[in-house]
Image (spheres, rainbow, N blue to C red):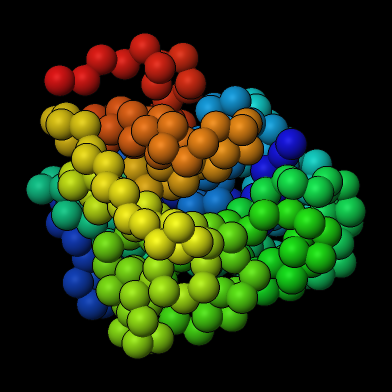
Amino acid sequence: MAIWNLGSINADMVYAVPHLPGPGETLAATGLERFLGGKGANMSVAAARAGAHVAHIGAVGADGGWAVERLTEYGVDTRFVARLDHATGHAIIAVDDAGENQIILFPGANRQIGEAQLGEALGGASDGDILLIQNETSAQRAAAHLARERGLRVCYAAAPFDAQAVQAVLPYLDLLILNQVEAAQLQEATGSPPEKLGVRDVIVTLGAQGAAHFDSEAGTRRDYPAHRVEAVDTTGAGDTFTGYVLAALDLGLPMPQAIGQAMRAAALMVMRHGTADVIPDLKEVLEARFA
Ligand code: ATP
């Protein structure tokens, strides 16, 4: 079985600045670091580190070769990452001495993925594989539709939240993963709680409170408390959680074990600075000891 992840690939350009720039101000940065980012890339790396076969469906520009190489090094199948005549998606992140930040996000090639590319990639998918989508690319609805036709299970991580984008794919979903804020936004947009929208499995992540799983067929809710850890940076915790849940489901684990493993991985993640580059592998996750 495999996970097909239609997902964003970004260069996170992190500039250290003495203070966040104001309107019209020119400011010299004192440092620059470049990291692999994008919710899609993070999820692919997490699922690959959790032991699944992950094929990433995405796009970068001529300046994105290093990001594809990095994904490959982390064990992701990058044969379906297109090189397009657009800038690679990137985030320009200014961080001041107090740790406050300001972010400019340019989606670039991530929003140029077309149906022909999807068809070519998913042509290699098998019945029972999983399609994962988020909201940082184009062609999400077309991908969900095609995947359903081919017998794949479809999972949507509803971030960054956009009511229209979620509603467009809802009819195709087997699994919906969203955080507390996104769950409230979806409820406001639809008038129903996420677990009442006809999706078989819904997971709402609750930060330090853990996560709740709603099984709409059984009509049940099960709560999973988070591990108690010293959190230093929660960036990427949600993406790591999603990648780990899907990898475990893809490898045949039942939902409670899949969520259990994902919570261990996410707990390790909040204890570290960084995103894709520091996602723990399955060995670390299984060996971790929590209070
Ligand atoms: P992100 O910060 O990556 O956007 P998110 O908002 O999508 O995350 P959260 O609900 O904040 O998602 O966190 C996802 C999972 O990470 C939680 O279900 C939990 O398992 C774990 N987690 C998050 N914060 C903590 C914490 N402070 N302590 C322990 N585990 C945590």
Give whichever of 138, 61 is nearer the camera. 138
Residue at the (27%, 47%) spot, across then down: 223
Q: Is residue 271 visible?
A: yes
Q: How many marks?
A: 0
In the displayed structure, would residue 155 be above or below residue 237?
A: below
Give whichever of 241, 194 is nearer the camera. 194
Quarter of image, res 210: top left
Quarter of the image containing the C terminus?
Answer: top left
Residue at the (35%, 87%) spot, across then down: 191
Measured from the top left, where is residue 107 in percent x and y?
Answer: 55, 66
Quarter of image, res 23: bottom left
Measured from the top left, where is residue 57 in percent x and y?
Answer: 71, 52
Quarter of image, res 236: top left
Q: Can residue 236 be seen in this view?
A: no
Looking at the image, residue 186 sits to the left or right of residue 218; the answer is left
Measured from the top left, where is residue 93 in percent x and y?
Answer: 34, 55
In the displayed structure, would residue 285 be above or below residue 71?
A: above
